[in-house]
Image (cartoon, grey):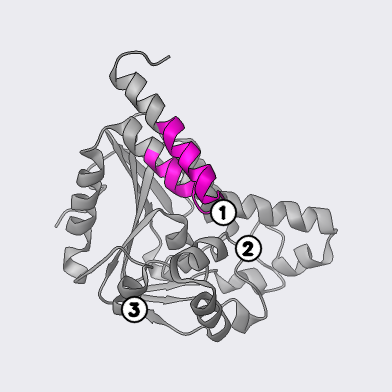
Amino acid sequence: MASLDNDLDPVLDKDGVRLTVDDAIATVTLTNPAKRNAQSPALWRALTEAGRSLPGTVRVVVLRAEGQSFSAGLDRQAFTPEGFDGEPSFIDLARGADAELDATIAEYQEAFTWWRRSDVVSIAAVQGHAIGAGFQLALACDLRVVADDVQFAMRETSLGLVPDLTGTHPLVSLVGYARALEICATGRFVSAEEAERTGLANLAVPVDQLENAVRDLAGAVLAAPRDAVVETKALLRGAQERTYEEQRVAERAAQARRLRDLAGLGE
């Protein structure tokens, strides 16, 4: 079966990340299966660049990975004294000033934040291992379709670290505090069955059906008018921070905009 970005000219193809665009659907592919799509600062910068390179026609962004693993997490070379070529090692960063360290981590996090934009719906297609940074990258997306061989794990705590690539907020939102703490503190694997049952995954399918399932989901999202989806995503995204009464107000304002637009009275 052809992949979601097959035969398309890449908009971006660097440092283990390829971006292709087919009208309203953009596909971001992790392209280093030989290293199980392990992540590095260069890959994070490429992911950030991919987000900035999306044409205005894009409504759905699919995140996928080549090979048997979605992403085995952070490349352990980051923890060696030499680090990556042309990059400060994590050991060097730890020895630097607080402001510099904070700014560097904030830069890394940018690769994980743009998937939540209101103007697109992001779908992660996840197979095999999605560990640490790989788990957090899947969590960065709005929706997750997983293969039945998926193995999620948050291993940062076992390494003496914390999940710091924006994964803690969506994890707690999806599965609740107690289960999120247990997953992070133990570093255990979460199977496809548990992921679907607890809300980590929207759908679990056999691995050979993964891309077709994602394609069907993307098509279903595209079937609704764009502005209605944008407004609905913004409403749902903000619901956790609003009170019940504040959400009622936000719903009325959003609906008023939609009604005026449908009546031809929009700005």
Check disc 2 and report the residue beneath it: 84
Quadrant of the drawing holding the N terminus: bottom left
* Label 2 environment density (alpha carbons within 10 Å; few <14, some 14–19, many ≥20): some
Q: What x and y, as percent, mark residue 166? A: 57, 59
Between the C-alphas of marks 3 and 1, the distance is 32 Å
> On the image, numbered disc 1 is attached to which residue?
42
Badge 3: how crowded within 10 Å, few (<14), some, or many (20+)? some
As drawn, 206 above or below 240: below
Point 25% across, 75% down: residue: 148
Q: Residue at x 38, y 41 (%)?
A: 232
Residue range in magenta is 232-254
Residue at the spot of label 3: 194
Q: Position of residue 39 (x, y in %)?
A: 51, 63
Residue situated in front as seen by the camera: 171 or 36: 171
Write the residue at 43% across / 38% down. Answer: 251
Q: Answer yes or no: do the residues labelled 2 and 1 have beta carbons within 8 Å?
A: yes
Residue at the image point whose x is 17% and y is 64% from the top: 209
Q: Mark 2 or 3 closer to N-term?
A: 2
Image quadrant assignment for residue 77: bottom right
Inspect the image, locate mark 1, and give the three-letter code of the amino acid beneath it: Ala
Could you tell me if residue 145 is visible in this image? yes
